[in-house]
Image: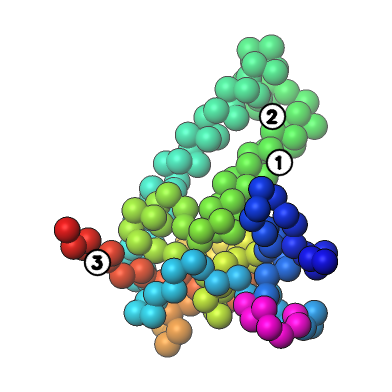
Amino acid sequence: MPSPCQHRWQGFTLIPPWCYNPSPTQPMDPDMPMHRPFAEEFTDTRPASLVKRLLAMVYDALLVIAIWMIVGGVGVMLNDGEAISAQTSSPSAVALFNSALFCITFLFFGFFWTRNGQTLGMLAWRLRVQTLEGGRLSWSKALVRFLCAIPSLGLCGIGLLWMLFTDERLSWHDRWSGSCIVQLPKPSPQKP
């Protein structure tokens, strides 16, 4: 009989991430922190440079702005063609709109960080966010990272610049969320 963490589907055994056990011969310790490794383990990763982090942020900012424009367009349609602003809309409508932007922005980053550790900007620069143990971020760690990035970047980027003065090269939001950004090696050329 399969364990409650395993499900049969068309001949494949699916194991949800919360039940992942890296050693199937030993029972899972419920007090042990979950480590969901990436499919391919790179042994020659190094901390990402500040310049590459900033370049990836520019790429991601362009994507987030495009998403905000779509959400803004939907908001205008729902508001009878009027812009949602403090002057023309009720305070609750403005709060709802800003909350929607905030939540959608978190879902954008959280989806990519928990799925493969790379947003589209990070993918372009071969960067990956991972736990300090080398695994994928959980949704709770992604939320902590997202919330901690606000003061880290909002205070003139001091939290990001902090990485230049530490041996671990961790920014504030890296340190507070127990994560790090690594530079992935270039893929090896395929032999014909």
Secondary structure found at label 2: loop
Q: Residue at x 36, y 69 (%)?
A: 184
| Residue to which mark 2 is pinned | 86
Residue at the far top: name it: 80
Where in the figure is residue 46, as x and y percent of width and height? 37, 78
**3 vs 2, front mark:** 3
Task: Give the spatial CA distance, label 3 vs label 2.
Answer: 54 Å
Q: Is residue 17 above or below residue 90?
A: below
Between disc 3 and disc 1, whose residue precedes?
Answer: 1
Q: Which residue is mark 1?
A: 99
Amino acid at dot 1: Ser
Q: Which residues are magenta?
A: 22-28
Under mark 3, the amino acid is Ser
Quadrant position of residue 97: top right
Residue 125 seen in the current view? yes
Q: Which mark is residue 188?
A: 3
